[in-house]
Image (tube, coloured by chain):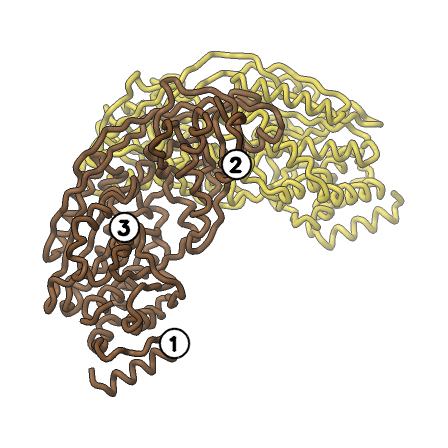
Chain colours: A yellow, B brown
Amino acid sequence: MSVTNLVKTAAFAAVFIATTATLADDQPPLDDATIETARTLRDAALEEDTAYNLLESLTTEVGPRLAGSPQEQVAIDWAVAKFKSLGFDKVYTEPVQVPRWERLSEHARVVSPFAQSLRVTALGKSAATPVGGVTAEIVHYATFEDLQAADTADIEGKIVFISNRMKRHIAGRGYGPAVQARGRGASEAARKGALALVIRSIGTDSHRMPHTGGVNYAADIPRIAAAALSNPDADQLERILKRGKPVTLHLDIQTKDHGMVEMANVIGEITGTTFPDDVVILGSHLDSWDLGTGAIDDGAGVAITMAAADLIKRMAPRPKRTIRVVLFSAEEVGLVGARQYAERHKDNLKHLIIGAESDFGAGPVWALASKVRPDATFVVDKMAQIMGALGVVRADRVAGGGPDVGQLGRMGMPVIDMMQNGNQYFDLHHTADDTFDKVKPEDMRQNVAAWAVFTYMAADWTGIF
Amino acid sequence: MSVTNLVKTAAFAAVFIATTATLADDQPPLDDATIETARTLRDAALEEDTAYNLLESLTTEVGPRLAGSPQEQVAIDWAVAKFKSLGFDKVYTEPVQVPRWERLSEHARVVSPFAQSLRVTALGKSAATPVGGVTAEIVHYATFEDLQAADTADIEGKIVFISNRMKRHIAGRGYGPAVQARGRGASEAARKGALALVIRSIGTDSHRMPHTGGVNYAADIPRIAAAALSNPDADQLERILKRGKPVTLHLDIQTKDHGMVEMANVIGEITGTTFPDDVVILGSHLDSWDLGTGAIDDGAGVAITMAAADLIKRMAPRPKRTIRVVLFSAEEVGLVGARQYAERHKDNLKHLIIGAESDFGAGPVWALASKVRPDATFVVDKMAQIMGALGVVRADRVAGGGPDVGQLGRMGMPVIDMMQNGNQYFDLHHTADDTFDKVKPEDMRQNVAAWAVFTYMAADWTGIF
């Protein structure tokens, strides 16, 4: 790219992005060829269903694939075979030590005053109740904070019920406040002598589909069973409680801890031409919860990142740097594969040029956020400009990198967030309803188009993010 | 009403209803007072939530109430107490002999080629599989008719899968064609040597909520277990079958027949002033399937008809004829309460002036159909005209009276259909998702308003329908 072109590009970007950084002298420009290829890839992605078909294959032929279960191994074998059949340059696995937890059975019913069953699911990694279950009076708190403020005398020997309802938000901002009840409720309740915890599902739907998701037990506190009611069942329990009479619940949660097993992160690479040791990381996770088939969480991310790299391999000149698609193991049970990946690769950080993660469902990308050096911002601005035709805007927040790739981001690796519309994500997240029929092929195409633009430009530019 | 008024009324109606019948000399006119009161009741109904609150009470305090179960008796006690507390003039029950069937457990899983669980529910009154379940190859038919046309050699020793998908329609017209698979599939499959039947749920949703509903066994054919997959699970099974390999399913359905038990139809009356022995019947059914709390099927109908009669009792001059609200027992398992009601009252048919039923959910009434004498049509036309402000049109079809009240309709009792918008009805019908949170208070008000108009005008007019 000539100096004239460089000035033109910067001026053009400034029209769209008021915050475009001044270019430093020591960063190379974006080549015209890189930009043209990114545009071509974007348009080509909208014409094919590679990601949608990969997702159909994963959810149909593997189905649920709980971390550490035999089904996660089936998924690993599926991924290795798919990378190979797609013709990736390198396909390999790296071992991950994974805790294996298993859901055996789960039942809840109101014993009095109005006897009836409730739909419940054990939270992930929940302890079991004693065999045969527990029967006790309910003590009800609106939020986790109310439970924190409560007296032990009100809780001892009872079942704690936290009823906070998650709010809908395009970027999922309702999740953080509500999920405290799921993550921390059990130990807080147990600390005060509760026999078990039930929460309102952390989800935005109104179907009788309880949402699972990990519980975190504090080290020094007895582990009590923790379970989620579906939103309609939590509504029902609240209505029953409103009558003002004592409410007795029977809860029977049976689960099993199998200890540690060996699984693997699965990696497929498209080797760079000029700087093959420099890597752009596309992350997602291969495990899912056991209730659904993990279509939106995170089969979609697996399919989108595989398809974006595959598209580049088939339809573009090889980029200068390597594209590495990493399918992490055991995200749901504590970012297990990603933490071990970061630990394993921490001494090679300077070669991990930039990374991004697809783990927010199958909704379209609507914004692009970044955490890069100021003098690399112009590259991200140009990515966003090319994605503009897909309905993507440049976000004014700092990227985090997602739960898995964010582990490397914390260590200093630059990251991009390809922010997806999550308005419907928490209707399905962690439920049995997370299935292939919920995914729209056109949204998968749009995601691949945006990812191909980011991936190709990040891998073909030779500057420092 | 004077002759002048009568002419005016007929002319006015003719503007709106082209088919207004010529009045016969022997039918009395509609009194102005009757019409004015109907309008007043219509408007008053939109200002209160009696029906919504009754529905909240029934679904919360009773919950699921399967025909013949102890919970149906709880519902009967609830209804008697509610009628009394509302101050109905007469409250009584009539015994009904009900077959009691119980769902014990239900599991389905694909054994090969892609091992995974499927969400399934036993059809109502289904036989059990042998203890431990059956494992067999699937043989797939797109429709019941395809099963009828199939050879025994293809079916013997296998599990039959019928995958027809119900179409959405405001009046539920997709139900009839699709439900053949549920009602008749088991005996047709068993006749050809099948071990069990699984069908795609007869429902319009895409949630992992299988739809139950009655199966009818032919008398001379072995009774095999019959179950429904949710729509997403049926999609999944179809995708697996499309791979072209043999698919083996494990199906374990445990159910129990308890024989006959005594339940009751519950009746509340507002006694007429001039012709107390002449009765307008408002029907609905008190039982529900066991999976949900029967909010739309048929708690809504119970609440709407009770509230319409209650409104008239509180806010209008007593009508000349008696209003009889009948909450039928055991509709879901074969119109049991309604058939016994019709048998019991068949010799009193001339005093059953007209009837209608609310059993199509909690959507708004959008059309009014009738089966009355031509010289009574003007009364129904006037009802429709007054309901016009509620968005109700006069339907151009002949009314059937609904499943329960239709039993009397078949014997010759005139009937009205208060046709509800059923576009969403089959998303929830017969599933665990049939719960109170799905019902909109404004729709309940609109229903009561329309029902109050029909009920008051039918009970206060003194002609023959």
Q: Where is residue A83? Give x, y as percent.
A: 70, 24
The answer for which chain carries disc 3 is: B
Q: Where is residue B407? Give x, y as percent.
A: 27, 52
Q: Amino acid at mark 3?
A: Asp
Q: Nearer the viewer, residue A268 or B451?
A: B451
The answer for which chain carries disc 1 is: B
On the image, which quarter does residue A330 sit in?
top right
Q: Nearer the viewer, residue A269 or B187?
A: B187
On the image, which quarter does residue A130 sit in?
top left
Report the disc number at residue B149.
2
The answer for which chain carries disc 2 is: B
Return the residue at label 1: B16
In what element is the residue under mark 1?
helix
Q: Amino acid at mark 1?
A: Phe
In front: label 3 or label 2: 2
In what element is the residue under mark 2?
helix
Mark 3 or mark 1: which comes first in sequence? 1
Q: Is residue B145 above or below residue B380?
A: above
Q: Do the dots labelled 2 and 1 sit on one chain?
A: yes
Q: Nearer the viewer, residue B408 or A378?
A: B408
Mark 2 or mark 1: which comes first in sequence? 1
Quarter of the image with the N terminus of chain B is bottom left
Q: Please rate how many residues cluster around mark 1, counting C-alpha atoms within 10 Å: few if below 14, some from 14 to 19, many from 20.
A: some
Q: Amino acid at mark 2?
A: Ala
In what element is the residue under mark 3?
loop
Q: Is residue B143 above or below residue B421?
A: above
In front: label 3 or label 1: 3
Q: Where is residue B230? Give x, y as percent.
A: 46, 36
Return the residue at label 3: B404
